[in-house]
């Protein structure tokens, strides 16, 4: 029996607004001088405190929804989601239940389209640190992160391979970065990945009667690996004629295995109800239009247009920038290069090879980059005789290398190239040199 | 006998230099030390109140003392909500209402007793013991703002602030023979008030006279950027039309034909109040009670008891989830019986499988009340009813009745569910027991001006209020 | 649904309430009485009626994304806590997630 993986992903992203979601505290959990430094009655859940939603966070959520081709709910609201945990100061999280801002979007991957079920906005919790104080094991709580705006993106279970899951997550990440809504630094917990995985017999169309949630995944690579190893685990269980248990499992990257996690609440019953402290949110067509107008050119459209007008490779050029501001800067650079008769494709290859990211120099003038490109790629044409003389000498002085090459060690060529360049003391086109060496010693 | 001052009178006397702040505070502290043990009204008093008052002589409230219900957070005094959980809680911030009172020259004199977490209508669920009705100490002052109403009735405060979810201002005001104003939901900020039923809670004044209510409401009403449910609807000058009477007002009398009520003194007194308004030039009609939503009928209050119980318990269970003893207060085992009762019911109502059956249904029926009032106010300027079906009940009556509060407040629950405003003023005195009945005057959204106007002229025309003038 | 002490205990657990043996009967009784009262609502005709969660008719009440320092507690955040350590709130160790 063969099985098809049924995979859905969930991504949480902290928005980089200036202030928190429901209060004016600084949204800067990593820059705080001390724990509990950026806190107020609202994000600390003091008695009597009330939330007032951050307009920008709402607009950014809708912007992301639009970028992911979602439909936008014209009437939305916040809801209370109840559970007890020491990092949740109010005993409930203000989230969205049945009317998220965005629904029904999609992401295109090389293995097909993946639908986005919903995107909603909520508040982040505090941070727990496990420590030992005076020999006693305790948990420390810091609420600097409490109330940071958090977006949750949920895909449909339409992903069918670990690689596709990774690609899908990465695409969403790229778009978030492109819109500059979050730094999405996974090490800082600004982006969190979760996946739900189950398997079904190849000939079936319905969803399996269980699913396993995977948590503690802190990179795209680990997302792929965690799903891979979980598929293996589930396959073994299914082949024994059993059904995997519906549960939440963590991923241990070192051992590359998943392990059961005890859930936060014995039986999750979140008791959602509409947040009475926040009036509903109506997204008028006018408001929606203004959010649309504030969006940069769609990420895929941008790459396609560059591919068309500059013949650049999409995967290479996408390495050069994160945000749409940087993309705009690149566009300026490309235009200038084109005017100067520089081949943009070569320029992009050069920058990508050098691992030069636009964000490192986006404050600079495009000309500086063009100068750098010139300086490092300019080659001098020399007489073939002079070149041949140099190569002959190198061959003569490195008999061992030549012998190795003839035995099949092709990478010796690079060594001989280096020696030749050294002898010449000039920047000559390396392709030309390699061609000549090859002819001489083959 | 004491000074027996109203806000209005005190301001006048201070301005004419016929009295000093010192005399006022001395009188209050004296009264406090003589009688607080007897009635259990204040849970804490502000020892620095007089010196604070000295700095505020030029402000609208002239440094006058205001009693504040102890579920309102004020800096410098504990805020306990009469609960063991918050027994030693010193708030780190100030509620908007008291901030505004302080900025206007008021001083928080002390914090008054309430039913723990404002759960109840007798102050008997207070973890610090019940308050006694100063009109007759064998009786309950009502609740949950029992302490604030009793403080005013006992002349242990010039005026006070209470909060109402459904009846918690109007019912104790009625039982203590004072004036209680429950503003439109969203008229006054809830920021800094320990939440009970978030979609219903509303702070308001409890005072000796209608005019004092107008004075206090003026100071606390209006949009607050820290409370997203406050309205930016303009705040009128509540004293401007206060004395214009009710001529040509159309007034409807509600609920008195209901079998639970028709034979009661409360119903008779309300009818009589209707007659008085008629004499004052209003057009008064009895509105028939209906078990269905019908034009020109008042929808029976009976469903409101259930709707209110469901909505409020659900919100209570949520609002009390934050008390985990980590950041402040004691742990959850310190909740009293009534709080546990409500948390359990509310948790159940919101749980899987029951949210639809109860919570959603309740919010649908709630809309019927909203629609009902909307229609009635297209015809009537004001609606009147008894504030409570009975006089104050003897202390101990609430024991073992998990629905005690809801039953005492049944006549104001429909209006609270709809979020409209209401004013309770004395309308009858039983001289044998020295206990009062209250008249509930209800107005449409943001029509506080009108209910105050009607209240003022009623107060002036009748003899129940011993503080007027 | 059967209303008994077992159900009440289960709900109490969900609400993080530890009930003592002697309060269970009384709370169960109160729960039963209240449910009986509110069950009176179950027959009422509400087809086509939209629920109402708020009475203000307000919509779109927001704050601008500005850092506002007036309400920041910083040092006072911990002033009412029973246990603190180097600026943190402290609880007995809870389950470690790995």
Image: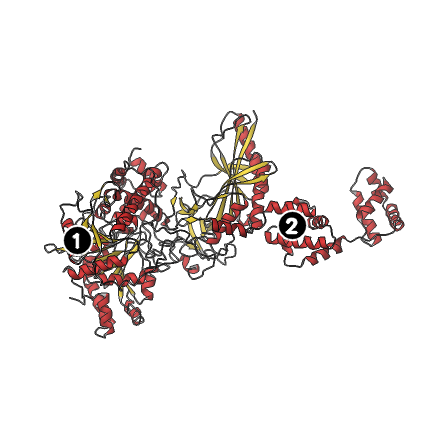
Return the residue found at the far bottom.
B17
**What is the number of callouts on the image?**
2
Percent of width and height locating residue A82? 39, 44
In this rendering, the label closer to the viewer, 2 or 1: 1
Q: Nearer the viewer, residue B250 or B369?
A: B250
Residue B305 can be seen, yes or no? yes
Question: The residue marked by circle 1 belongs to what chain?
Answer: B
Quadrant in which the N terminus of chain A appears: top right
**Left or right of residue B137: residue A236:** right
Residue B76 can be seen, yes or no? no
Residue with the mark numbered 1: B274
**Mark 2: secondary structure:** helix
Return the residue found at the far front.
B248
**Left or right of residue B25: residue A84:** right
Please tell me in which quadrant of the rendered image residue B207 appears.
bottom left
Quadrant in which the C terminus of chain A appears: top right
Question: The residue marked by circle 2 belongs to what chain?
Answer: A
Q: Nearer the viewer, residue B304 or B239?
A: B239
Residues at marks 2 and 1 touching, judged by CB atoms closer than 8 Å: no
- Protein image colouring: secondary structure
**Mark 1: secondary structure:** helix
Q: Nearer the viewer, residue A305 or B229?
A: A305
Percent of width and height locating residue B384? 21, 52
Please tell me in which quadrant of the rendered image residue A203 appears.
top right
**Left or right of residue A51: residue B246:** left
Return the residue found at the far left.
B432
Residue with the mark numbered 2: A320
Could you classify mark 2 by the number of other residues whose Cα lies within 10 Å: few (under 14), some (14-19), or many (20 or more)? many
């Amino acid at each position: 029996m063969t099985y098809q993986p049924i995979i859905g992903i969930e991504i949480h992203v902290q928005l980089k607004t200036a202030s928190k979601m429901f209060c004016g505290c600084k949204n800067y959990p990593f820059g705080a001088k001390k724990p509990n430094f950026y806190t107020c009655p609202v994000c600390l859940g003091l008695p009597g405190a009330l939330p007032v939603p951050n307009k920008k966070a709402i607009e950014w959520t809708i912007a992301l929804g639009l970028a992911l081709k979602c439909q936008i709910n014209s009437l939305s609201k916040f809801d209370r989601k109840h559970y007890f945990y020491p990092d949740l100061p109010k005993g409930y999280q203000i989230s969205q239940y049945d009317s998220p801002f965005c629904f029904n979007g999609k992401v295109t991957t090389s293995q097909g389209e993946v639908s986005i079920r919903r995107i909603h906005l909520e508040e982040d919790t505090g941070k727990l640190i496990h420590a030992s104080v005076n020999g006693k094991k305790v948990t420390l709580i810091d609420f600097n992160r409490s109330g940071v705006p958090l977006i949750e993106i949920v895909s449909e279970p339409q992903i069918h391979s670990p690689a596709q899951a990774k690609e899908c997550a990465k695409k969403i990440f790229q778009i978030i970065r492109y819109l500059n809504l979050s730094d999405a630094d996974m090490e800082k917990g600004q982006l969190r990945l979760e996946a739900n995985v189950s398997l079904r017999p190849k000939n079936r169309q319905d969803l399996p009667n269980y699913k396993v949630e995977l948590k503690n995944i802190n990179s795209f690579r680990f997302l792929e690996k965690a799903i891979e190893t979980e598929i293996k685990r589930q396959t073994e269980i299914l082949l024994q004629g059993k059904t995997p248990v519906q549960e939440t499992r963590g991923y241990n990257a070192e051992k590359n295995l998943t392990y059961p996690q005890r859930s936060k609440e014995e039986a999750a019953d979140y008791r959602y109800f509409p947040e009475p402290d926040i009036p509903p949110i109506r997204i008028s067509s006018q408001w929606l239009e203004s959010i649309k107008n504030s969006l940069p050119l769609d990420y895929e459209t941008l790459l396609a247009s560059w591919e068309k007008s500059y013949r650049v490779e999409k995967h290479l050029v996408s390495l050069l920038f994160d945000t749409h501001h940087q993309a705009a800067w690149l566009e300026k650079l490309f235009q200038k290069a084109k005017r100067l008769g520089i081949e943009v494709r070569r320029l992009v290859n050069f920058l990508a090879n050098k691992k030069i990211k636009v964000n490192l120099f986006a404050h600079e003038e495009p000309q500086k980059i063009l100068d750098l490109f010139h300086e490092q790629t300019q080659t001098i044409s020399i007489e073939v005789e002079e070149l041949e003389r140099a190569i002959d000498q190198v061959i003569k002085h490195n008999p061992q290398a030549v012998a190795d090459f003839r035995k099949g060690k092709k990478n010796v060529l690079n060594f001989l190239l280096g020696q030749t360049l050294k002898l010449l003391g000039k920047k000559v086109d390396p392709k030309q040199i390699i061609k000549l060496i090859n002819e001489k010693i083959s | 006998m004491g000074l027996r001052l109203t806000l209005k009178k005190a301001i006048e006397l201070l301005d004419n230099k016929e009295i000093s702040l010192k005399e006022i505070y001395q009188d209050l502290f004296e009264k406090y030390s003589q009688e607080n043990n007897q009635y259990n009204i204040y849970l804490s008093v502000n020892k620095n109140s007089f010196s604070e008052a000295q700095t505020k002589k030029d402000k609208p409230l002239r440094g006058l003392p205001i009693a504040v219900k102890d579920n309102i957070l004020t800096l410098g005094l504990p805020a306990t909500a009469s609960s063991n959980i918050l027994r030693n809680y010193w708030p780190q911030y100030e509620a908007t209402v008291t901030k505004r009172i302080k900025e206007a020259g008021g001083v928080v004199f002390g914090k008054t007793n309430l039913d723990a977490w404002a759960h109840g209508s007798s102050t008997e669920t207070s973890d610090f013991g019940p308050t006694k009705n100063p009109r007759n100490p064998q009786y309950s002052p009502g609740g949950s703002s029992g302490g604030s109403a009793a403080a005013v009735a006992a002349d242990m405060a010039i005026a006070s602030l209470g909060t109402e979810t459904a009846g918690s201002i109007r019912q104790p005001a009625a039982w203590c023979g004072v004036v209680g104003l429950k503003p439109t939901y969203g008229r006054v900020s809830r920021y800094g008030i320990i939440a009970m039923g978030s979609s219903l809670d509303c702070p308001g004044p409890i005072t000796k006279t209608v005019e004092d209510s107008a004075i206090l409401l003026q100071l606390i009403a209006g949009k607050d950027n820290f409370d997203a449910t406050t309205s930016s609807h303009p705040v009128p000058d509540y004293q401007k039309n206060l004395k214009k009477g009710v001529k040509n007002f159309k007034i409807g009398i509600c609920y008195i034909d209901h079998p639970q009520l028709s034979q009661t003194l409360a119903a008779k007194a309300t009818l009589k109040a209707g007659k008085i308004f008629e004499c004052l030039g209003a057009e008064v009609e009895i509105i028939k009670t209906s078990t269905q939503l019908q034009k020109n009928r008042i929808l029976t209050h009976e469903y409101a008891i259930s709707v209110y119980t469901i909505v409020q318990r659900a919100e209570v269970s949520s609002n009390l989830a934050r008390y985990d003893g980590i950041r402040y207060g004691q742990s959850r085992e310190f909740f009293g019986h009534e709080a546990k009762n409500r948390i359990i019911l509310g948790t159940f109502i919101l749980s899987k499988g029951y949210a639809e059956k109860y919570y959603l249904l309740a919010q649908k029926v709630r809309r019927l009340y909203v629609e009902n009032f909307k229609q009635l106010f297209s015809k009537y300027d004001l609606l009147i009813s008894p504030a409570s079906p009975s006089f104050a009940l003897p202390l101990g009556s609430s024991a073992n009745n998990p629905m005690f509060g809801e039953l005492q407040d049944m006549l104001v629950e429909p209006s609270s569910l709809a979020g409209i405003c209401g004013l309770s003023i004395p309308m009858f005195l039983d001289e044998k027991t020295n206990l009062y009945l209250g008249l509930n005057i209800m107005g449409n959204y943001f029509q506080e001006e009108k209910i105050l106007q009607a209240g003022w002229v009623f107060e002036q025309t009748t003899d129940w209020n011993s503080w007027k003038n | 649904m059967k209303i008994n002490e077992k159900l009440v205990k289960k709900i109490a657990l969900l609400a993080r309430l530890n009930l003592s043996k002697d309060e269970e009967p009384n709370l169960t009784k109160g729960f039963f009485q209240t449910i009986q009262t509110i069950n009176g609502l179950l027959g009422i005709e509400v087809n086509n009626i939209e629920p109402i969660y708020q009475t203000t008719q307000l919509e779109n009440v927001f704050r601008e994304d500005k850092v506002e320092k007036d309400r920041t507690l910083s040092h006072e955040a911990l002033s009412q806590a029973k246990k603190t350590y180097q600026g943190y709130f402290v609880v007995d160790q809870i389950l470690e997630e790995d």
